[in-house]
C-alpha cells in the first residue's frame, strides 16, 4: 500500500509544472509527510492526556491542523469534500497562510532542540513548489491515507523514504550529496560498535543515514529498558546540516526511523571556530561522509589551524577536535588524501597520526558511490593516542560496481570479520608507521599482496547498465520538455 502511494505521489508531481526532478518530489513529499506525522503525534498525545484526565495543549492552532485544512472528515471518517480547500483556494492558503504561520514558530520556540523550533526551521527554508492546487489536493489525500501509528508502519515508510533518498543521487542538482550506500554505513557502525549512553554525531548529516543506521543498530536489543529507550530518543544522536533540503530530509528520515524529536541543527558546521569547542560540546562517536570537492571561503578557513579550501579537510579537523579523548571516528574521504603532497594534506595526515590512533583504512573500489567518479577510503580512528600500526583492507567485490550492481552487505562481511583481529589476508595487511617517510607522511594504499585484479563485466551486465542509463536520459529529456 505504502509503495503504491509513494509512486502515485511521484506520478502527480511529475505532471506539475513546479516539480522537475526527484529532488523536488522528495522535498514536496517531505513537508507534507511531516505535517501528517505531526498531526498523528498530536492526536496520540491528546488521547494520552485524556486517558490521564489531563488537558493537552496543541502545538498548532485549530485552523492550521491537518484535520482542518488538509483532510476534514465527515461522520463516516471519509474526507468531506464540501469542506475541503482545493485548486487556487488550497494553494493560496498553503502559500500565504500556512507556511508563514509555521515559519513563525522559529521565533516563538524556547530552543533549537524543540519540535516548535524544527517546525519553524523547516517551513522557513522550503516552499511549496506544487503549482496546481488540484495536484496539491490529490497529493494531500494520498498522504492522508498513510498511517504512522505503529512501528511496523513507520518501518515500512522509512524503507520507502530511504529509496526516495537513494533515487535523488541520480537526479542532478547535487542530489548525490544526500546518499551514502547503506551497506557501507552499516559496516562502519559495526566496526565502531557504539553503546547506549554514548553520544553519536555527524556534522555533515545529509539525509541522516549514519544516525538512522546507528539508531537501528542500537535499538535492535530486545532487552532495552524504558530509560535506555529514552536515552536513545533524546540524548544519543546529534547532527548539523547546512543545506535546507537536506535538513528537511534528515528530520523526516529520523522521524520515520522512530526518533520523534531529532537533535538536528540547521547550521554551517564549518562556520564554528574550532577554538570555541569545549569539553561539554564533545562526542563519543563521529560517523560521517563529509562533502568533498567543495571550496570554502577565506573567512571560514580562518576557523581552522590547517588552512585549506577543501571542505572535507576542514570537516576532518572539526571531527578530530569534537571527539572526546578515547572517542571513535569513522569518516569517508577521498583516497587522494592519503598521498597528496600539498601542505594541507600533509599537515592533516600528521595531525591525524599524532593525535589519534588511525587503526583501520578501508579502501573502497570505484563505483561505490554511484554518480561520483572519485575513489574513497574510510578512516577509522580513536582520539587520544598516536598511531603505531594501520590495518588496511582493500575491498574488492569481484565485479565492477554500478547502478545495476551496487555495493551490498555481503561485500563487506569479510572486512568486518577480519577487522576484529586486524588479520592479514590477500586483501588486508598492516603498516608499521615507524617506517613511513616523516617528510611526506604518505599513507597511500599499496597492497603488498598484488593489489586489485581487473574485473571484466559480462556482456549482459553492460547491456543492463546501458538500459538503465537510457531510461534516465529519457526521463531527463521529458523533464526538459515539460519546462519548455
Image (cartoon, rainbow, N blue to C red):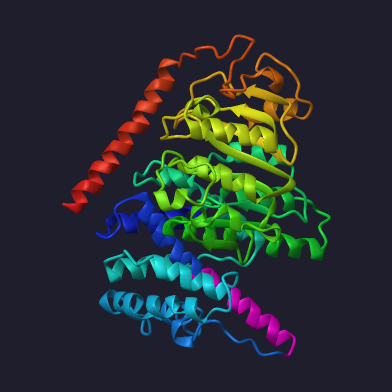
Q: Main secondary structure of the magenta part?
A: helix
Task: Check the image and report above or below for 125 versus 434.
Answer: below
Task: Check the image and report above or below for 370 versus 103.
Answer: above
In the rendered structure, which segment of residues is drawn in magenta?
A: 35-53
Q: Residue at x 61, y 55 (%)?
A: 155
Residue 32, image x and y in percent?
44, 67
Q: In this view, does 348 lie to the left or right of 11?
A: right
Residue 31, image x and y in percent?
44, 65
On the question of residue 213 being in view, the answer is no
Task: Return the residue nearer the eye: 319 or 413.
Answer: 319
Task: Check the image and report above or below for 463 versus 190.
Answer: above
Mark count: 0
Q: Residue at x 66, y 35 (%)?
A: 380
Q: Is residue 16 rendered magenta in the image? A: no
Q: In this view, does 192 lie to the left or right of 243?
A: right
Residue 114, image x and y in percent?
59, 73
On the question of residue 48 being in view, the answer is yes
Residue 250, image x and y in percent?
52, 57
Amino acid at each position: 500500500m505504502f509503495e503504491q502511494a509513494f509512486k502515485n505521489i511521484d506520478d502527480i508531481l511529475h505532471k506539475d509544472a513546479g516539480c522537475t526532478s526527484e529532488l523536488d518530489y522528495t522535498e514536496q513529499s517531505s513537508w507534507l509527510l511531516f505535517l501528517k506525522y505531526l498531526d498523528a503525534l498530536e492526536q496520540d498525545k491528546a488521547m494520552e492526556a485524556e486517558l490521564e484526565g489531563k488537558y493537552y495543549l496543541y502545538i498548532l492552532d485549530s485552523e492550521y491542523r491537518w484535520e482542518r485544512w488538509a483532510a476534514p472528515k465527515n461522520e463516516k471518517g471519509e474526507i468531506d469534500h464540501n469542506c475541503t480547500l482545493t485548486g487556487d483556494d488550497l494553494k493560496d492558503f498553503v502559500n500565504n497562510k500556512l507556511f508563514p504561520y509555521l515559519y513563525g514558530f522559529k521565533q516563538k520556540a524556547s530552543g533549537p532542540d524543540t519540535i516548535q523550533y524544527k517546525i519553524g526551521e523547516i517551513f522557513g527554508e522550503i516552499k511549496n513548489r506544487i503549482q496546481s492546487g488540484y495536484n496539491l489536493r490529490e497529493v494531500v489525500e494520498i498522504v492522508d491515507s498513510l498511517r504512522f501509528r505503529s512501528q511496523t508502519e513507520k518501518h515500512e515508510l522509512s524503507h520507502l523514504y530511504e529509496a526516495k533518498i537513494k533515487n535523488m543521487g541520480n537526479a542532478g542538482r547535487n542530489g548525490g550529496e544526500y546518499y551514502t550506500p547503506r551497506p557501507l554505513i552499516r559496516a562502519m557502525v559495526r566496526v565502531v560498535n557504539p553503546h547506549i549512553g554514548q553520544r553519536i554525531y555527524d556534522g555533515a548529516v545529509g539525509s541522516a543515514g549514519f544516525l538512522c543506521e546507528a539508531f537501528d543498530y542500537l535499538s535492535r536489543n530486545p532487552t532495552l529498558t524504558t530509560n535506555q529507550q529514552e536515552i536513545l530518543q533524546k540524548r544519543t544522536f546529534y547532527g548539523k546540516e547546512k543545506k535546507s533540503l537536506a535538513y528537511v530530509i534528515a528530520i523526516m528520515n529520523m522521524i520515520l526511523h522512530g526518533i520523534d524529536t531529532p537533535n538536528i541543527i540547521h547550521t554551517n558546521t564549518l562556520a564554528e571556530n574550532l577554538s570555541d569547542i569545549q569539553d561539554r560540546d564533545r562526542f563519543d562517536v563521529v560517523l560521517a561522509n563529509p562533502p568533498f570537492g567543495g571550496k570554502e571561503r577565506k573567512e571560514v578557513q580562518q576557523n581552522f589551524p590547517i588552512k585549506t579550501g577543501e571542505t572535507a579537510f576542514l570537516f576532518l579537523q572539526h571531527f578530530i577536535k569534537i571527539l572526546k579523548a578515547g572517542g571513535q571516528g569513522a569518516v569517508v574521504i577521498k583516497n587522494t588524501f592519503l598521498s597528496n603532497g600539498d601542505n594541507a594534506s600533509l599537515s592533516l595526515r600528521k595531525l591525524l597520526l599524532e593525535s589519534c590512533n588511525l587503526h583501520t583504512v578501508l579502501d573502497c573500489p570505484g563505483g561505490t558511490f554511484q554518480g561520483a567518479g572519485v575513489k574513497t577510503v574510510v578512516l577509522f580512528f580513536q582520539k587520544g593516542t598516536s598511531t603505531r600500526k594501520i590495518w588496511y583492507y582493500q575491498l574488492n567485490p569481484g565485479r565492477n560496481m554500478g547502478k545495476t550492481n551496487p555495493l551490498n552487505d555481503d561485500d563487506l562481511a569479510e572486512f568486518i570479520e577480519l577487522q576484529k583481529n586486524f588479520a592479514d589476508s590477500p586483501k588486508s595487511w598492516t603498516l608499521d608507521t615507524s617506517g613511513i617517510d616523516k617528510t611526506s607522511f604518505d599513507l597511500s594504499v599499496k597492497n603488498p599482496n598484488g593489489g586489485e585484479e581487473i574485473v571484466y563485466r559480462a556482456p549482459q551486465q553492460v547491456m543492463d547498465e546501458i538500459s538503465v542509463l537510457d531510461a534516465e536520459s529519457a526521463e531527463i529529456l521529458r523533464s526538459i520538455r515539460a519546462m519548455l
